[in-house]
């Protein structure tokens, strides 16, 4: 049986991680899942030849702050890196800060390259290890990340970012005790460090201590500065997971009030409206998000599902097609479009999308099962039986793997 599109949205469209898009943090610096930036507002300058250190008058744009445009940070840091006569320690700092800008652009390889250079020049620059560790996390290398965060802590025992990011890395390895210990240490150092509270909430969730997790989110909101929204954003996502969409929308309202040009904020609120059955509001918010950032796939999926729920199949298919164009390797767009095609009786188109899902991941049980249904509706029984058998085989394999992990 084909899945309800609302269920599919919850599975494939509501994950607000920075692998899908960027979220500007209201903090000066933050954790692995809360960073992003303002898009490049200036055109990077190029220089025909290196200048001297004496020509570099200040560092005001070569900084690691989240709210500076990356292109300009990269250009100014590059100018400093290439300057003649710059002291080794200063050059290390320039590499570190350029790496931070690359991190906000999710360019893991350049992050690691720049932080390697920074560490070569200054092996005691703790923040370079933190940033390189963040680069490793982008490449899903949690063990490498943990090693770098640990080195940073050895160099600076009170480095808040190192403890928070190591907590996140340990959480990604399902090490709840380690994640809790690091997040608690960060809060011991600074009880008003919001990103520490959010990391602790995530660690509690991993440990199935849901009431404690929510308590930490409430504390993050309590200590949020007037122009901050990180606590509200994270608590809104927690409300969504609980199915409390009214409170989620209220917290997203606060985020939008503080950052009215955030496409992600509108897309997130639109997703809550969608899951609350408020399709007009979902479409309005998703449309606003698309206007702010046409390159995002998430709000297109939100709007497409709202159209599906209203049986506006042509509009839904158009939105899912645009989402696929924006993010061709994400499964959500294909799966949702296939569901829409099936509702329209376009089984060949649905089968093509399920086949694309299987190309992306040949262990996609749901794609095999849904394609089997589509073949069956076309009375292509041999193909339907073959896909159903494959789905059963993969399901058994998944159960065996889960049982091995539990032993």
Image (spheres, rainbow, N blue to C red):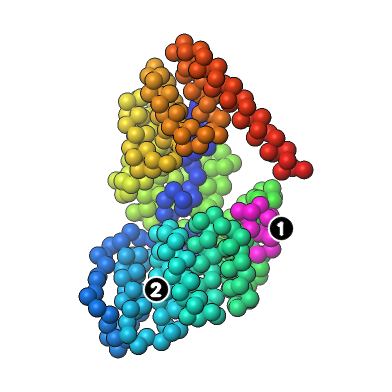
89 shown above or below 131 = below
Q: 386 above or below 68?
A: above
Per the image, the residue denoted by label 2 is 63
Q: Is residue 236 left or right of residue 74?
A: right
Q: Is residue 47 visible?
A: yes
Q: CA distance from mark 2 to mark 1?
A: 34 Å
Q: Quadrant of residue 220?
A: bottom right
Can you identify the residue that label 1 sits on? 177
Closer-to-camera residue (183/360): 360
Asked if residue 165 lies in the magenta stretch, the reply is no
Task: Please tell me which residue is depicted at 47% across the width and 76% down the height of the picture.
Answer: 118
- Identify the magenta region: 170-182
Residue 119: horizontal and vertical position, in percent?
Answer: 50, 76
Choose top left, top right, bottom left or bottom right for residue 155: bottom right
Say whether residue 252 is visible.
no
Asked whether the beta carbons under mark 2 and mark 1 sit within 8 Å of each other, the answer is no
Q: Give the image location of residue 388, x and y in percent.
A: 57, 21
Q: Position of residue 105 (x, y in %)?
A: 40, 59
User: Element at badge 1?
Assistant: helix
Total labels: the figure holds 2
Q: Residue at x 56, y 30 (%)?
A: 365
Question: Against 277, is 81 above or below?
Answer: below
Q: Earlier in the sequence, mark 2 or mark 1?
A: 2
> Taking 310 as reference, is 10 left or right?
right
Position of the N terminus, as image quadrant, is top right
**Around disc 2, counting alpha carbons within 10 Å, would you say few (fewer than 14), some (14 to 19), or many (20 or more)?**
many
Residue at the farthest left position: 48
- Residues packed near mark 1 inside 10 Å, few (<14), some (14 to 19) or many (20 plus): some
């Amino acid at each position: 049986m084909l899945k309800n599109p609302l269920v599919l949205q919850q599975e494939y469209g509501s994950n607000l991680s920075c692998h899908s898009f960027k979220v500007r943090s209201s903090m000066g610096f933050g954790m692995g899942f809360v960073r992003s930036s303002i898009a490049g507002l200036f055109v990077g300058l190029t220089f025909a030849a290196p200048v001297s250190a004496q020509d570099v008058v200040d560092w005001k744009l070569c900084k690691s702050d989240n709210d500076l445009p990356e292109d300009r940070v990269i250009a100014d840091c590059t100018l400093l890196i290439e300057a003649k006569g710059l002291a080794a320690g200063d050059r290390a700092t320039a590499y570190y800060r350029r790496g931070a800008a690359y991190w906000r652009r999710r360019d893991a390889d350049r992050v690691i390259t720049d932080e390697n250079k920074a560490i070569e020049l200054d092996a005691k620059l703790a923040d370079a290890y933190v940033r390189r560790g963040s680069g490793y996390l982008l490449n899903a290398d949690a063990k490498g990340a943990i090693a770098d965060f640990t080195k940073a802590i050895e160099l600076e025992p009170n480095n808040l970012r190192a403890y928070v990011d190591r907590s996140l890395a340990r959480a990604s390895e399902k090490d709840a005790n380690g994640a809790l210990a690091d997040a608690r240490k960060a809060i011991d150092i600074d009880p008003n460090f919001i990103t520490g509270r959010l990391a602790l909430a995530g660690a509690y969730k991993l440990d199935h201590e849901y009431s404690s997790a929510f308590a930490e989110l409430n504390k993050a909101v309590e200590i949020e500065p007037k122009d901050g929204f990180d606590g509200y954003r994270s608590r809104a996502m927690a409300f969504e997971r609980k199915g409390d969409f009214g409170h989620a929308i209220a917290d997203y309202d606060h985020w939008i009030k503080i950052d009215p040009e955030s496409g992600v904020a509108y897309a997130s609120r639109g997703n809550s409206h969608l899951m609350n059955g408020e399709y007009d509001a979902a479409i309005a918010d998703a449309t606003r998000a698309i206007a702010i950032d046409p390159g995002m796939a998430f709000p297109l999926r939100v709007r497409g599902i709202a159209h599906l729920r209203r049986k506006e199949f042509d509009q839904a298919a158009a939105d899912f097609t645009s989402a696929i164009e924006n993010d061709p390797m994400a499964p959500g767009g294909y799966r949702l479009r296939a569901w829409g095609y099936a509702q329209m009786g376009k089984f060949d188109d649905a089968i093509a999308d399920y086949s694309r899902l299987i190309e992306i991941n040949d262990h996609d049980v749901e794609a095999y099962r849904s394609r089997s249904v589509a073949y069956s509706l076309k009375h292509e029984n041999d193909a339907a039986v073959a896909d159903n058998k494959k789905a059963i085989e993969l399901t058994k394999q998944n159960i065996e793997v889960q049982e091995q992990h539990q032993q």
